[in-house]
Amino acid sequence: MLSFHDLGHQNLPTILVTVLTSPSITPTIYLVNKEQNPEVALQHLEKKIDTLVQVCQNLHEENQQLKTQQADLLQQRNALMEKTEKAKTRVESMISRLKLMEI
């Protein structure tokens, strides 16, 4: 784990900015030098926010696709369970008839 001193900015006044940047929502910490041009810092932050917005949009789309896929799979599962139950009933009926034929 990095400490503040490991970052090599011991003598500069800094601000810590945390931005969420990845699909796994892992925060990324950026050091912004107070003496840095505020326009450059703002542009950098705007880019990171745009990236976050895009990640959120992608996650939303993926979530919608997964919900649709889940609904389809549940329908398939229900259809298969119904088929299995019908086959089970038919086999049980056949077994009963065969037992009656043995008597």
Image (tube, helix red, strand yellow):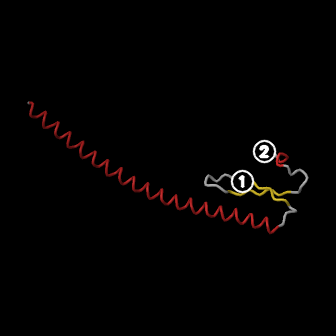
Q: Quadrant of the C terminus?
A: top left
Q: Position of residue 101 (x, y in %)?
A: 9, 34
Question: Would you say 90 lies left or right of 36 here?
Answer: left
Q: Residue furthest top?
A: 103
| Vertical relation: 60 (above or below) 1 | below
| SS at circle 1 | strand
Q: Position of residue 10 (x, y in %)?
A: 89, 50
Q: Earlier in the sequence, mark 1 or mark 2?
A: 2
Q: What amino acid type should be assigned to the residue bearing mark 2?
A: Leu
Q: Position of residue 95 (x, y in %)?
A: 17, 36
| Residue 19, quarter of the rendered image | bottom right
| Vertical relation: 40 (above or below) 101 | below
Q: CA distance from mark 1 to mark 2?
A: 13 Å
The label shown at residue 2 is 2
Q: What amino acid type should be assigned to the residue bearing mark 1?
A: Thr
Viewer-proximal residue among 55 and 95 = 55
Q: Residue furthest right?
A: 11
The label shown at residue 102 is none
Q: Quadrant of the N terminus?
A: top right
Residue sitting at x 28%, y 45% = 84
Residue sitting at x 81%, y 59% = 32
How would you rate the neighbour count of disc 1 (Cα within 10 Å): few for under 14, some for 14-19, many for 20 or more? Answer: few
| Residue 91, quarter of the rendered image | top left
The label shown at residue 28 is 1
Residue sitting at x 82%, y 58% = 15
Residue sitting at x 70%, y 62% = 48
Viewer-proximal residue among 40 and 54 = 40
Question: Would you say 7 lies left or right of 23 here?
Answer: right
| SS at circle 2 | loop
Q: Residue furthest bottom?
A: 39
Q: Are marks 1 and 2 in contact (CB under 8 Å)?
A: no
